[in-house]
Image: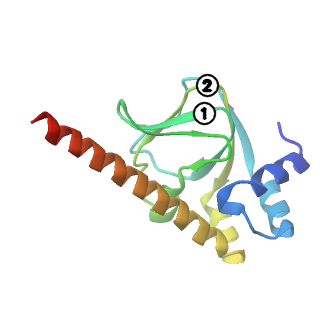
Amino acid sequence: MLSSFDRLLFIRRVSIFQDLRDEFLVKLASAMDELSFPANHTIFEQGEEGRSLYIVVSGRVRVHVGERDLAHLDKGTFFGEMALFDAEPRSASVTTTENCDCLTLNQLQLTDAIEETPEIAINITRSLSRRIRELNSKINSYEAQLKTRD
């Protein structure tokens, strides 16, 4: 369990919260829940309703569709944000690959945070854009490999 001070120091380093006012981060940090998961635990399944964004405090998770890995995320990264913005079911499953601690932010907390500090939405958009570019690159590499096999 993180102390209030350690929680503040931690979220200050998370990309979506960088460059935000300390007063705001203190309030946000105190509103977050901390959850612990064992290794090989499915945090959520593809198709489930999404109600929270998760931030990895320790450990590692894999984002996957079936057995195909989309990403591996570790300390300081976040996941689950898409369902909070578009109210669509989870687009992938997330499973721990080792013991994992996460902070969570629910949809109402995130909406309130964005209303108070719109920079969070910009930071999340930047992160989503980076992830889409990475996935596009993986798709292009995969397609190129398929063409060379033919």
Which residue was labeled with disc 1? 60
Q: In which quarter of the image is the N terminus?
A: top right
Q: Where is residue 58 in the image (x, y as percent from the top left)?
A: 70, 35
Identify the residue shown where x is 67% and y is 48%: 104
Mark number displayed over residue 132: none
Q: In this view, does 150 lie to the left or right of 97?
A: left
Dot 1: element: strand
Q: Is residue 108 left or right of residue 147?
A: right
Q: In which quarter of the image is the C terminus?
A: top left
Dot 2: element: loop
Q: What residue type is labelled 1?
A: Arg
Which residue was labeled with disc 2? 98
Q: Is residue 14 above or below residue 62?
A: below
Q: Specify the quadrant of the image occupied by residue 48.
A: top left
Q: Position of residue 49 (x, y in %)?
A: 46, 50
Identify the residue shown where x is 46% and y is 63%: 129
Instruction: Say few, some or many: other residues with alpha carbon within 10 Å of mark 2 (under 14 / 14 to 19 / 20 or more).
Output: some
